[in-house]
Image (spheres, rainbow, N blue to C red):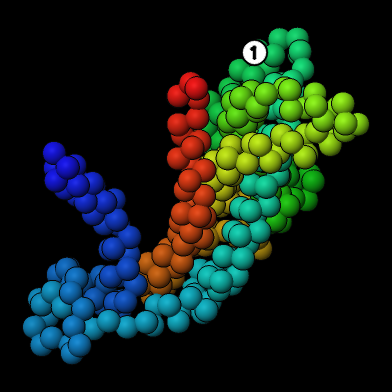
């Protein structure tokens, strides 16, 4: 039975990692090998004479090309990564902190129509974001926010806030109120109790919420493409802009850039994997 379980896990892992493996192989090809009608998947030390051979010569030109400004783009890949990092991490931090504060209010205070308010907050996720892209664009033009980091940070924070509130409320509900009552006896204010007790106790929930919010902001394409033209362009919009390259899509550079782009989220998810496991099973086991 254990052998069968191991085989299933290995097969699933291979299936899940296949896109990343293909990106890795494409990133060390030249463009001719990347767009060849004959699949070339095996690196070789010398170029094969047979054009139909599956071998290709591995190289790192694609990674070096990430520092170049390609046709259809206004800056190099690394500048767009910087924009993605700033927008993604700042909006994630804002979503988690605001969501935790809002969830604390719903969890600890009696609010009239709390269930209705929570449903309304959740309902903001029902509508596709692109359905409101035109009103948002018109509003942002009045506020001079298109093409700025602040514009996307505010937008991603707002759209991730509903998810953050719902996730964090479940974690805060499980924290005994006796902890705060003891803090009040010691002279702590409500804010002190929230910052010194609730925030540390809900670290698992904040980690889980942060990962989901970061993934949403990191991969968002529609608003990033619509609200930005030259500055503060994130990586997904940068990749789309490369379609204007007169020499054709630089697929090896796109593959190399995609691997670099995936790395921060993959590393962060790995670092908080214990919190994620705790988060997805939270509340399923009663002690």
Q: Quadrant of residue 124?
A: top right
Towards the viewer: 71 or 114: 114
Q: Quadrant of residue 119?
A: top right
Give the residue furthest to the bottom. 46
Q: In the rendered picture of this protein, how many numbered marks are placed on residues?
A: 1
Can you say whether 177 is above or below 200 in the image? Answer: above
Give the residue furthest to the right. 187
Could you tell me which residue is drawn at 37 percent across and 82 percent down? 60
Can you say whether 52 is above or below 101 in the image? Answer: below
Towards the viewer: 174 or 184: 184
Residue 183 at least partly seen: yes
- Please state the horizontal and vertical placement of residue 175, each as a whole percent of the image: 65, 27
Q: Secondary structure at mark 1?
A: helix
Q: Is residue 150 left or right of residue 68?
A: right
- Please state the horizontal and vertical placement of residue 47, each as a whole percent of the image: 17, 88
Q: Is residue 43 left or right of residue 91?
A: left
Can you say whether 162 is above or below 35 in the image? Answer: above
Pick the quarter of the image with the N terminus: top left
Q: Is residue 23 left or right of residue 90?
A: left
Q: Which residue is mark 1?
A: 115
Could you tell me which residue is drawn at 77 percent across and 17 percent down? 109
Q: Is residue 182 left or right of residue 148?
A: right
- Please state the horizontal and vertical placement of residue 248, each as a whole percent of the image: 37, 71
Could you tell me which residue is drawn at 80 percent across and 33 percent down? 193
Towards the viewer: 269 or 194: 194
Could you tell me which residue is drawn at 14 percent across and 42 percent down? 4
Can you say whether 66 is above or below 280 in the image? Answer: below
- Please state the horizontal and vertical placement of residue 213, each as a whole percent of the image: 57, 43
Residue 243 at least partly seen: no
């Amino acid at each position: 039975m254990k052998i069968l379980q191991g085989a299933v896990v290995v097969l699933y892992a291979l299936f899940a990692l296949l896109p990343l493996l293909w990106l890795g192989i494409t990133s060390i090809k030249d463009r001719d090998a990347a767009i060849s009608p004959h699949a070339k998947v095996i690196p070789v030390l010398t170029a094969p004479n047979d054009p139909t051979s599956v071998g290709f010569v591995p190289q790192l030109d694609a990674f070096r090309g990430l520092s170049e400004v390609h046709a259809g783009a206004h800056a190099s890949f690394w500048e767009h990564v910087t924009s993605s990092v700033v927008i993604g991490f700042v909006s994630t931090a804002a979503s988690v902190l605001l969501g935790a504060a809002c969830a604390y209010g719903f969890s600890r205070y009696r609010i009239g129509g709390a269930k209705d308010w929570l449903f309304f907050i959740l309902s903001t996720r029902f509508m596709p974001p692109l359905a409101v892209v035109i009103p948002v664009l018109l509003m942002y033009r009045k506020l001079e926010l298109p093409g700025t980091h602040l514009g996307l940070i505010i937008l991603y924070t707002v759209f991730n806030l509903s998810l953050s509130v719902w996730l964090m409320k479940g974690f805060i509900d499980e924290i005994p109120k006796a902890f705060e009552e003891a803090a009040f006896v010691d002279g702590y204010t409500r804010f002190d109790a929230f910052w010194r007790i609730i925030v540390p106790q809900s670290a698992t929930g904040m980690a889980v919420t942060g990962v989901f919010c970061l993934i949403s902001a990191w991969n968002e394409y529609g608003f990033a493409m619509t609200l930005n033209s030259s500055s503060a362009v994130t990586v997904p919009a940068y990749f789309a802009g490369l379609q204007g390259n007169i020499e054709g899509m630089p697929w090896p550079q796109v593959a190399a850039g995609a691997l670099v782009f995936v790395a921060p989220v993959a590393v962060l998810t790995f670092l908080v994997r214990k919190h994620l496991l705790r988060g997805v099973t939270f509340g399923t086991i009663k002690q």
